[in-house]
C-alpha cells in the first residue's frame, strides 16, 4: 500500500479541481504524453465542496479503469452541489505511456477545498495507489 498527495490551485474552485485532475494523471503518466482525442462527460453530486472533490477524483479513477483510458484535459463546471465535467484523453498504450502506478482511489486524508488568504483556491487530498 502507498499514498500520494495531490493538489490543485486555481483562481476559481473549478480551476483547482481541474489542476488536481491533472495532478492525478501525473501520478500515473506524464500528462503531456496523453492526447486529448476522446471526450467523456462526468457528473457528480455531493453536499459540500470537499465531498464533491473526492467524488470527482473517484469518478475520474473509475472512468480510467472501466474505459482503459488516461485523461489530459479537464473542463469543470460546478453549480450548487453538482459538478459537470468534460474530460478528454485516449486509450492507454502501455508501450507509449509507460504508466508507473495504478491509482485505487481518492481518500479523505488531508482533504481540503478552500480559498486561501491570497484568494487562490486549493483542492487537495491523498490518493491510494
Image (cartoon, rainbow, N blue to C red):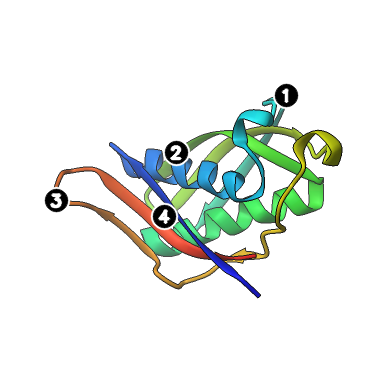
**Callout 4 secondary element:** loop
Work out which residue is located at the far bottom of the displayed protein and give it. Answer: 1
Residue under the image location 32 percent in, 51 percent down: 122
Quadrant of residue 94 within the rendered picture: top right
Residue 69 placement, left or right of 45: right
**Callout 1 secondary element:** loop
Which of the labelled discs sits on residue 37, or is there none? 1
Residue under the image location 65 percent in, 38 percent down: 71
Front-lying residue, 18 or 6: 6
Which of the labelled discs sits on residue 81, or is there none? 4
Circle 3 residue: 117
Circle 2 residue: 77
For the residues marked 4 and 1, what is the alpha-carbon distance in whole angstroms?
29 Å
Front-lying residue, 71 or 87: 71
Residue 25 placement, left or right of 49: right
Question: Which of disc 1 and disc 2 is earlier in sequence?
Answer: 1
Amino acid at each position: 500500500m502507498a499514498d500520494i498527495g495531490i493538489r490543485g490551485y486555481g483562481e476559481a474552485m473549478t480551476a483547482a479541481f481541474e489542476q488536481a485532475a491533472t495532478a492525478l494523471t501525473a501520478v500515473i503518466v506524464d500528462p503531456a504524453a496523453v492526447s486529448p482525442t476522446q471526450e467523456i462527460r462526468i457528473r457528480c453530486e455531493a453536499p459540500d465542496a470537499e465531498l464533491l472533490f473526492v467524488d470527482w477524483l473517484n469518478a475520474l479513477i473509475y472512468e480510467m479503469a472501466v474505459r482503459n483510458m488516461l485523461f489530459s484535459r479537464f473542463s469543470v463546471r460546478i453549480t450548487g452541489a453538482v459538478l459537470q465535467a468534460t474530460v478528454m484523453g485516449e486509450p492507454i498504450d502501455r508501450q507509449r505511456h509507460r504508466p508507473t502506478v495504478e491509482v485505487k482511489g481518492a481518500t479523505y486524508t488531508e482533504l481540503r477545498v478552500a480559498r486561501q488568504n491570497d484568494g487562490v483556491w486549493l483542492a487537495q487530498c491523498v490518493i491510494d495507489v
